[in-house]
Amino acid sequence: MAQQQPDATGVDIDPTTMAVLRRAIVNVVNEMGTTLGKVAYSPVISEGRDYAAAVFDRNGHLVACGDHDLTGLLGTLEPTLELIFQTYGEEDLREGDIICCNSTHEAGNHLNDVRMVKPVFVDGRLGAFVADVGHWTDIGGATPGSINPLARDAFAEGLRMTPVKFVDGGTVRRDVIDMVLANVRMPYESNGDIWAQMRALDAGESRLMGLVERYGGDTVLAMFDVMQEHAHAIFRQEIGAMTDGVAEFEDYIDADPLDAEQRPVKVALKLTKSGDRLTFDFTGSDPQPKAGIGSTRPLTQSGVYVALLNLFPDIPFNHGFSRNLEIVTEPGTSVHVAFPNPVSGCAAGGFEKVIACVLNCIGQLAPSKRVGSTYNLINATVGGIDPRFDRPYVMYMWNEGGFGGGPDRDGGDAPTMAMYATGSMNQPIEVHERFGPVQYTELEIAQDSAGAGKWRGCPGIRHSYKLTHGEGLVGVFGDRKRFKPWGVEGGLEGSGQDVHVNPGKADERSLGMSASDEPVKAGDEVRVLSSGGGGYGDPLERDPALVLRDVELEFVSVQAARDVYGVVLVEEDPPRVPWRVDAEQTAQMRAQRSASATVRTEA
């Protein structure tokens, strides 16, 4: 007979109640997310699902997140609760409060990710918190969309909100909300997002209190401890299989846009695994860059969580997992940017490199988890005045791309969202065309973009859109044009990334991965090129039948099949069976290349 699970307060919870109540608490968060997504006005939230929600215990420790919430955002919410405690203290928190904040350096990532928190009182005492965070399309500042690679300090990036009560004891603070709306470009949209986030918190509180009525306050609060201990036990089991030891890796942000010499910025990790403890030491990283591409301390923590939870997907994400990790950073470095240094491009810069370093180091100590690098986020915006309606608009687009290959499989066939945002979705082109003066001309797989290998990376994608009316300003904040997604165990790197205006025309220009206020006019076309992931293993060891399949799917060109994979294809019976593998020529070519590689290695 299964034994009951006592929590820290001595309340016994039988296994059946534990299973049912654990899932019920997760569903509370799912309903919060559904409410936020359906009520929000911004397509970034409503269509792209760039949001997260969570339940916390009375100490501000994560208890549960939803099935589709963005891990990258969730990992910054415990620091948000810490900042709220520092600002108010438990004595200043009342039933009915809703506190808003987007303080980047202390509690988050960039200013667009606005977070709201509501204390939940159980039997007259503070028992829990519900929280959510959503990406507002615009939060003010110098550029449309508020993601500005040329901002020289945090003040130029937009409106910074330290913790402030939007609702005080059940009374809505219209004065505070109106002040916020006066500082953003699309107040109508932002007002809808504010109310969506607040109503999502109300829904979470209501559903949580429903569980209290059914099971009792002591049982529900005790379950918080049980869920954290459950995550802790699974973490110990998973990490116990890893070899004790030390692994090190360095990755680089392409360049600091505000550095006169355009030098790259290093993110360095030394991972030490001892028993069931993991220590992530980032103190070897470069000093913080001048531009907003470094990572905040909360976002660096989140990057560690993202990589681990993707490699160990059976571990539930709550404080029982994260409390086992020691994350060491030094203020004023690329992984712990200090105020007032800008940070609006942190998710596309230091954050992604933190994830990459963790993936590589874990792979060194656990070879079954070794994978190539993923593609990199590109924040791409266009904004201005829409002459059709004589009103401001901002279109914020992010790119899909490819994950890296692993020990026994490709990185995938379908480009996807970033590893830290797998719960989000690409925004439908019809929505962009409805809300802004743009028309999409292209959205397709980018051929030869995946890193080659015995197991290739997933390919990247190509977006192109044309401005149909008026004039606009384009902004780009991304990375991995210069330091491309790396491969492992002999796998090759992905294609790298870029953004072009008017590709193939006489006035074509490359914006690279860092641009601000780049003018475009009606008829101009913008193309965003996204990379595939890095490969795993020697490309000459890839099954020729898989190479043929990749050619048929147009992931790989016939030329690359020959030059990179050593697979010779001959025309067969187009269009029914356009190609077949010439087994004899393929074997000869691969043997010759392997021999040449051996000679070079010995030399």
Image (tube, helix red, strand yellow):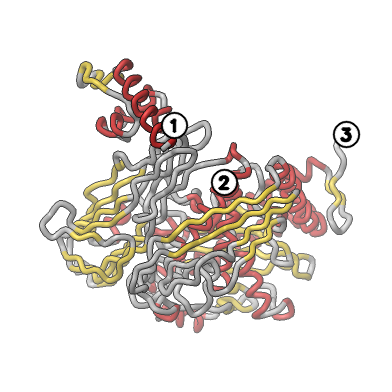
Q: Residue at x 39, y 68 (%)?
A: 256
In this view, the residue in front, 421 or 133, is 421
Taking the image as drawn, is residue 398 in sight? yes
Query: On the image, which quarter does residue 501 sit in?
Result: bottom left
Between label 2 and label 3, give the one nearer the viewer.
Answer: 2
Residue tagged 2: 310
**Residue density around tag 1, few if under 14, some if 14–19, many if 20 or more, within 10 Å:** many
Residue tagged 3: 1
On screen, 157 above or below 33?
A: below
Taking the image as drawn, is residue 102 in sight? no
N-term mark: 2 or 1: 2
The disc placed on residue 332 is none
N-term mark: 2 or 3: 3
Which quarter shows the C terminus?
top left
Secondary structure state at the residue bearing disc 2: helix
Q: Amino acid at mark 3?
A: Met
Between label 3 and label 1, give the one nearer the viewer.
Answer: 1
On screen, 3 above or below 520?
A: above
529 left or right of 322 in image: left
Q: Residue at x 58, y 77 (%)?
A: 163
Q: Marks 3 and 1, how far apart in space?
A: 48 Å
Which quarter shows the N terminus?
top right
Query: On the image, which quarter does residue 152 sit in?
Result: bottom left
Q: Residue at x 10, y 57 (%)?
A: 506
337 left or right of 583 in image: right
Q: Amino acid at mark 1?
A: Lys
Residue tagged 1: 454
